[in-house]
Image (cartoon, rainbow, N blue to C red):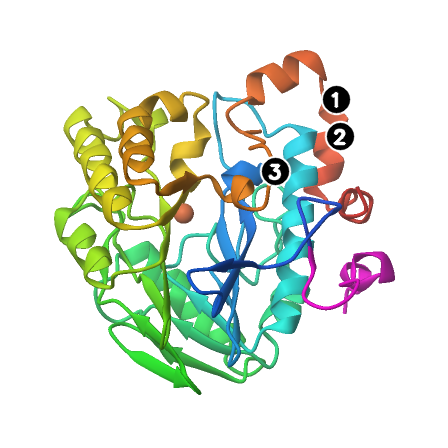
Amino acid sequence: MLNFYSSPEINFRKGNEIKIAGDQIRDPVPIGNGDIRVLPLAFESFGVRSMATFVETDDIKIVIDPGSALGPRFHLSPHEREYIALARSRRTILEAARRAEILTVSHYHFDHYVPNFEDWVWLWSSPEIAEDLYRGKTILAKDINSNINASQRKRGYMFQKLNSRTAREIKIADGRSFTFGQTILQFSKPVAHGSPGTELGYLLMLTIRTPRCCLIHASDVQGPIDDETLRMILMEKPDAAIVGGPPIYLAGYKIDEGSLTAARNNMVRLVERVPLTVVDHHLLRSLEYRDYLEPVFREAEKRKHRLLTASELVGLEPQLLEARRKELHEREPVAKDWYNRLKKGELKEELIKK
Ligand SMILES: [Fe+2]
């Protein structure tokens, strides 16, 4: 069992604080009347691909989508700084998960859960880390038998097969609700990963509700692009929404202009109604995200509503490492041999301490 994740300096100092983005210590942030508290754990604004989020109420503590990853971009390998951010994110997610009873998985993309195989190049995953993360937990996850594409079905099958003995239980969550004291976790029916009918498949949104407070986490809805997804979010009347923004870096290549316009229009309608919106993920793989969001910021301002990145919710400047990959490699070149050592797992202990 690897145990370097639980060295004393990375444990919670006291109370509810959790170390995020390396050495930044933060309390979960109250939303609405404060009955629900939320702490972003790993997002593009912290330098990795993820929407991992810790949520607590007086009844329950959960980690939503406890994965993080790096991705290919500009035909360049991720920079060393991205690997430091990835190792940190894994540490943070494991620490938060230790405090939580429940983990949820919205869909089976590797930036949303940790797979059980060893990979230090993109995922920072291993059988030991997966066991550490899932052991003893109740996992509420996307059904692998319906509304799922072939690759996610395969991954989901392995996820269930390899973790069902170590986890306390793994339950299908699609369209279901789970009650813990006064807290209700309501999973949506499967919604499109972006545009309706996309090959990227489906995901579950999660609404966390107490009698006087409501938060919705909508992972890769990409704005949302889909009007029906927006309607479902607004129907919950959330005090706060955490949404994955659209991948404007894929414009004209994997996503058409019409979808990006639809996503932006829907985000305008979202911030018109929701007092606090956190937008992050795919959208923050581009430095131009603020230009794209201009009409959305204008609407939020008009309504006196807040629109933030995940890092800004906890008072940190966005660190868009993937978007800055070219610049990072130019400024601080990384030796070829470094990547050979990384691939073999020789750097994992060194990077996790940074
Ligand atoms: Fe994602």
Position of 285 relative to 102 (above/below): above
The kind of residue on which mark 1 rests is Ala
Q: Amino acid at mark 3?
A: Leu
Does the magenta stretch mainly form a helix, a strand or a loop? Answer: loop
C-alpha span from label 2 to label 3: 29 Å
Q: Count residues near mark 3 (Cα–Cα under 10 Å), then give few for <14, some for 14-19, many for 20+.
A: some
**In the figure, residue 189 lies in which quadrant?**
bottom left
Nearer to me, 141 or 284: 284
User: The residue tagged with tag 3: helix, strand or loop?
Assistant: loop
Amino acid of disc 2: Trp
Query: What residue appears at the point 53 percent right and 78 percent down from the top-left corner?
Result: 58
* In front of the other: 161 or 98: 98
Residue 70 makes an appearance in the image: no
Residue at the spot of label 2: 338
Outermost right residue: 8
Residue that label 1 marks: 335
Q: Earlier in the sequence, mark 2 or mark 3?
A: 3
Task: Tell me the quarter of the image containing the N terminus.
Answer: bottom right
Residue 250 in the image, given as x and y percentages of width and height: 32, 27
What is the magenta range? 1-18
- Label 1, secondary structure: give it: loop
- Position of 104 compared to 118: left or right? left
> Residue 342 in magenta?
no
Q: Which comes before the other along the chain, label 3 or label 1? A: 3
Q: Position of residue 127 (x, y in %)?
A: 63, 65
Few, some or many C-alpha atoms within 10 Å of disc 1 (few <14, some 14-19, many ≥20)? few
Q: Say above or below: 168 vs 342.
A: below
Residue 304 screen position, x and y as percent: 34, 40
Which residue matches tag 3?
A: 316
The answer to whether the residues at label 2 and label 1 have Cβ atoms under 8 Å apart is yes
